[in-house]
Image (cartoon, rainbow, N blue to C red):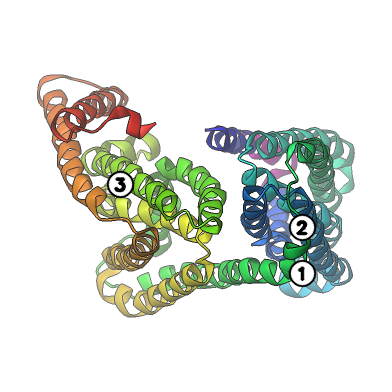
Amino acid sequence: MILTVSGLILRLIGIVFKVWLAKLIGSEGIGLYGLVFSVFVLASTFATSGISTAVTRLCADALANNNQKGIKNILKKSIFVTLIIAFISMAILIFGADFIARRLLFEERCKIAIQILSLSLPFMGICSCLRGYFIARRKATAPALSQIFEQIIRIAVVFFGVKLTLNKGLAVSCGAVLLGDVIAEIFSCLYLYSVYKHDIKRVKNTKSGDLITGKIYEKIKEIAFPITLGRYLNSFLRTTENILVPKQLKLYKLSGINPLSQFGMIKGMALPLVFFPSTMLNSVSTLLIPELSEALSKNYKSVVKKITEKILFLTSLGSVYFASVFFVCGRQIGLLLYGDQGVGVLIKMLAPIVPLMYLDSICDGMLKGLNQQKFTFKVSISDSSIRIILVILVLPYLGIKGFVYIMYFSNCFSAFLNVLRVVSIGGTDFKWLRTSLFSAVFALFSLTFFDNIITHFLDFSILGYILTVIPLSFALFMILEVVILKINIKELL
């Protein structure tokens, strides 16, 4: 809950901040910021990706054995690794800023901003290691607060920096914005480190850390490398897909709608909305890593089985309800949020694969906790590669419907492999799957029941319709779950 709420707060602050910043430096300034940040994201992946997960996994193992010395060694060596990578990346950005700005971004005004933002890489790397430690300790408050403080400091620095540099050109103003990012990262790093120094004293130290010390670099590489490589390749393949989709949609002659508009409707409007209820899954997925890693290190098969069964059950229960909401109320949701019925149609078309999307996401997190990051890497890359091939072959003949069909196939493919792997390793059965099928029937019945009553007998606005149908249907859905399926409410907590 702490990670979910803090994530929502950060998103809200970020939206307000971007709106305010756009008024100050205009769309051109925001464009410069976006260009620089795209380069920075690529560089920061080297310094952070995979390291945080590696620290969480290794610290969870050490905590399970009351190994304070081992935890200190893990953090010391992890920070050493991430600093080496961060300083190399920083040097490339500082000395290559002119080439990147002129030759790759075709905007020489980005040079100063690239050099400034590169300074935050070492601090970002240290923060990722410390956050991994706190997740292993099951203490989400420290990383959540650090990110909120970071955002507040960033806004304060940017506010004064941009005000002072507005008359000195966009290049300098953009540099001031990114200087805010650097200072915010430094303060966030100092805050997390101070909390860590206080917290590590509470960890028991009943075992020596010598055994883990000798293998620490090998273990960091084993865990972090597949995750980092997977994110890079996946990012590259997704970018390729995003470039190809509008291009292939142009070849579909029967649609009178702008291909770029169709692409924006499904990728920029429908999909983010369909994924929004899964925000909590990201938090759960992160926190599952130390739980499963510790159980695995102690060979507690019954604990692994219990965790995987409960999470699969809760995910399937929630996902079938949200899928039913999108299927029954998709048109109204599209009209309310975007004023576009076409978006609502796409939401309704995507609804049946929502359970697969959510299960795939949560299983990916569980598999990382079960030391299966190489398997998730293979599944992710295979899935993205197949999608690109299908985009090239299918879209010219079926248009946007073809893209929806591709999503059906893609989510079936990856969810089937990841769920099967979790079930196999966790030793769980498919009782949760049978329950979810009944739950899907109950959810559809509940939503359709109130949808028909309000549509035919009451004259509600779209907002009134949604605020009435969803809460009432959820109450009836839960009653059916408890009365017919005999689900214990305590199991959901």
Regarding residue 109, the answer to whether it shows in the image is no
Regarding residue 492, the answer to whether it shows in the image is yes
Query: Which residue is tagged 2?
Result: 209
Q: Residue at x 86, y 50 (%)?
A: 172
Magenta part of the chain: 16-27
Is residue 19 found inside the magenta-colored segment of the image? yes
Query: Which residue is tagged 1?
Result: 214
The main secondary structure of the magenta stretch is helix
| Image quarter of the C terminus | top left
Alpha carbons under labels 3 and 1: distance apart: 42 Å
In the image, residue 5 lies at what x, y percent? 55, 32
In the image, residue 55 lies at what x, y percent? 68, 56
CA neighbours of label 2 inside 10 A, class few (<14), some (14 to 19), many (20+): many
Of the residues shown, which amino acid type is indicated by label 3?
Ser
Q: Residue at x 41, y 47 (%)?
A: 307
Alpha carbons under labels 1 and 2: distance apart: 9 Å
With respect to residue 243, does 477 lie above or below? above
Alpha carbons under labels 2 and 3: distance apart: 41 Å
Mark 2 or mark 3: name the one nearer the start of the chain: 2
- The residue nearer to you, when weighing 334 against 207, is 207
Of the residues shown, which amino acid type is indicated by label 1?
Gly
Q: Secondary structure at mark 3?
A: helix
In the image, residue 273 lies at what x, y percent? 40, 44
Instruction: Please tell me the numbered disc located at residue 316.
Output: 3
